[in-house]
Amino acid sequence: MTDPIDPSTWFGSRVEPGQYTSLDMPASESYSGADITIPVHIWRAPKPGPTVCITAAVHGDEINGTGAIRRIIREHPFKLAKGTLVLVPVVNILAFERHSRYLPDRRDLNRSFPGSHTGSLASRIAASFFEQITKRCDYGIDLHTAAVRRTNFPNVRADMSNPKLAEFARAFGAEFIVDSKGPKGALRSSAVKAGCLTIIMEAGEVWKVQPGVVEYAVRGISNCLKHLKMIQGSPAKPPYRVETDRTKWVRATHGGFLEFHVAPGTIVEEGEPLATNADLTGEDRNVIRAPQAGVVIGMTTMPSVAPGDPVCHLAFTKSGALTKIERTIDQLEDDSLHERVREDLSTSVHLIEYDQPNS
Ligand SMILES: [Zn+2]
């Protein structure tokens, strides 16, 4: 029997220390009976070390991470000194083919892990991936974006009650860490249960490869590999860090058309206007405000809303901490990655300064 974490053979092909190669992982069969495979790039360092899996497009339309992983495959931008990198640009290949979040059977692959070989299509693909890849990895970074018609400021999500996982999550160097175990059936929560310490990054939008997000993801991945001593150097620290398990979607109370007053990454005071909601001729205005001080880590990009539609996803922390963060941001250079990502993501919403009505 082979050691389950022996990194020398992948899907029947040998990969020697110091080599990299692209292989196809058998996943399923199509409606026409053709084999469906998932392209995987295996990169082995000359020396032994941890096996780390970087995945994207578990939701088939979330391809920002695909852009980041393709960049690593194309450029090999760092020298891998130890261990093995398993790079999977698109996990959910059938959903990706349809530009969709979901599989053709309308199931969510990211609620189907660890899967079963006798279950649904989603469950079988999940099992296939989980056994051939996840179970053979020590660590995982799964790259996501916001769902359709929304955008996220980059944030890492991880179960911070696990000290080793918390360290790995912090090493990524994101300003925001949301402490959560993740939903049942997600790749992340199932991987952690199986001993593969996995975090996710949520950043940007579906159907796009956004330059700032790609750079942010590649930097985060390099930071994590530095933390594991797989590449040289120490992880870059973020300008500030918020770790929280308190987030909330602020929703529209009326149907209407939004003028946004905040963008992803904006820090807001309690009661600060997030968006003004009005009918199409600008009458019947109502202002959507922050219920308490927080940071916009996600928001809709869709100006037209119905009652109950999500407008802003706020992350909460101590308000004293926010004042300090604002001062830190004020001192950042315009060409810092933080500011470029903010600038990049703000182009998806029409920002209009809040017009204080005369009282
Ligand atoms: Zn996702």
Image (tube, grey):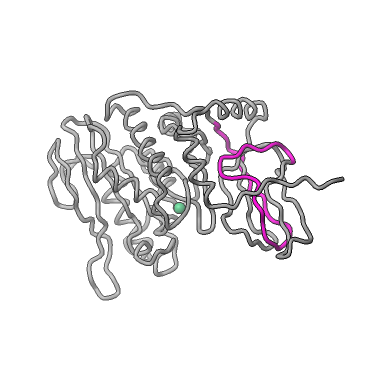
Residue 157 in sight: no
Is residue 131 part of the magenta span, yes or no? no
Residue 354 in sight: yes
| Closest to the observer, 137 or 345 | 345
Is residue 246 part of the magenta span, yes or no? yes
Residue at point 38% right, 63% down?
A: 95
| Closest to the observer, 179 or 40 | 40
Residue at point 53% right, 39% down?
A: 178
Question: Is residue 78 positioned above or below 188 on the image?
Answer: above
Query: Residue 329 appears in which quarter of the rendering?
Result: top right
Q: Quadrant of the N terminus?
A: top left
| Closest to the observer, 119 or 333 | 333
Q: Position of residue 279 (x, y in %)?
A: 73, 63
* Left or right: where 304 falls relative to 183: right
Residue at point 44% right, 43% down?
A: 201
Q: Position of residue 313 (x, y in %)?
A: 60, 47
Q: Position of residue 332 (x, y in %)?
A: 51, 28
Start and end of the magenta stretch?
A: 242-271
